[in-house]
Image: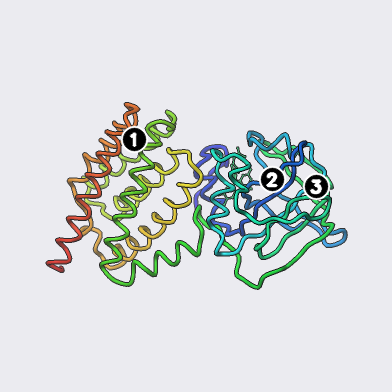
Amino acid sequence: MSQTPPDANARSFRHALGCFPTGVAVITTTDAQGQPVGLTCNSFSSVSLEPPLVLWSLRNNSKSIDIFRKTEQFAINVLSHRQDDISGRFASSSKSMAEKFDGVATSRGWGGTPVLDDCIANFQCSVYARHEAGDHVVFIGQVEAFEQSSPEDALVFYKGAYMMLAQSLRALALKDNAAERDLIQARAAVLGSLVRLAAVAARQEDFDAIEQNLRVLDRHAEEGDMVHRAEAAIVFFKQLTAAAHNDMLTVVAQSLTTMLEHTVSHQVAHAQAHAIYLPALTPLRWRVLEGMKARDPDAAADAMARYFALVAASRAQAELSPA
Ligand SMILES: Cc1cc2nc3c(=O)[nH]c(=O)nc-3n(C[C@H](O)[C@H](O)[C@H](O)COP(=O)(O)O)c2cc1C
């Protein structure tokens, strides 16, 4: 196992952290005007039984950081596997707090903190300690009241995706070829949106990482190393996802990529790595990158659409003439 210092590669550090599955919670409090505030969090953890302490951490550049630095109480609302929509909504930077809470039933908990109804558990806390820790603040809460209100399974976040979603998509894909068509269509739609966003939001370091990986991918293809070529093709999608810098779409795209990884590892295990190699996709990957670098969302999305049209046509052909 190779050893990489965490600061050498922030993205691989995040990926390594993602190997640890967590639940998902919405942290709620009120601002100075008494209005509800909330955000999605998976850094929640238990700390102590006596006294009952829990913790979570918030990044310094969150729009809510000042409110949480000042508040004396917060609640941790643990989400069920049916509440991935709530997780996405409360993770969205572009939504106002009023939009986040719109239509979400809440009650007043300890100290007047809003508590989300319909969660599987909540912990209503007074602030026990705040610790500056790198680019995050760690909040330790003393649990003043808690409820466990539903026997439902928790929403699980793993490798950047909701596990229930990834599992059900995988089951769908394994079912039959029609589901594979749906998957290609879904990936085309999501990746189309992602590259449009990335054309606007990507940073130079995103472009550099994508370019470096595409060179690796092309070299593997030239050398006939189809297993590593297939791996680099998956990295390409992960990098496009990261380059869009949009938390909500990241979750959807990661789930679809996780599924693709299952399919590809199945094909690699069955020595079909050559069968899934389409040389015509190579220039299209580069064109996606060029479109993004030119800050031209239409050009990037057009190349991505051509990419998936080719993939779909090739899969339809394979169905007609199975190997
Ligand atoms: C599953 C999931 C877990 C998250 N966990 C955390 C977390 O523990 N700490 C954090 O600061 N942000 C976390 N986020 C991101 C915030 O929810 C998101 O940045 C925030 O709500 C919106 O940004 P804002 O605070 O700038 O408005 C998570 C997002 C998701 C989708």
Identity of the amino acid at label 1? Glu
Compared to 51, does 291 lie above or below? above
User: Regarding mark 3 in the picture, which secondary structure is present there?
Assistant: strand
How many C-alpha atoms fall within 10 Å of the one at disc 1: few (<14), some, or many (≥20)? Answer: some
From this viewpoint, which residue is outermost toward the left? 321
Nearer-N-terminus badge (1/3): 3
CB under 8 Å between discs 2 and 3: no
- Label 2 sits on what residue type? Ser
- Element type at marker 1? helix
- Sequence-first tag of 2 and 3: 2
Q: Nearer the viewer, mark 1 or mark 3?
A: 3
Q: Which residue is mark 2?
A: 57
* The one of 12 and 67 positioned closer to us in this rendering: 67
Q: From the top left corner, tell me how far across and down residue 300 is, in percent.
A: 30, 36
Which quadrant would the C terminus be assigned to in this image?
Answer: bottom left
Q: Position of residue 253 (x, y in %)?
A: 42, 50
Find residue 142 and report its horizontal and vertical position in percent: 83, 53
- Whole-number angstrom distance, CA of label 2 to CA of label 1: 33 Å
| Residue at image location 25% in from the left, 39% down from the top | 303
Is the CB of the residue bearing disc 2 within 8 angstroms of ligand 1?
yes
Q: Is residue 20 left or right of residue 123?
A: left
Q: Nearest the camera: 164 or 109?
A: 109
* Badge nearest the viewer, 2 or 1: 2
Determine the secondary structure under disc 2.
Answer: strand
The residue tagged 1 is 211
Residue at (71, 68) in percent of width and height: 149
* Circles 2 and 1: CB atoms closer than 8 Å: no
Q: Label 3 is placed on what type of residue?
A: Gln
Report the residue that reaches farthest toward the front. Answer: 103
Report ligand 1 position as a quadrant. Answer: top right
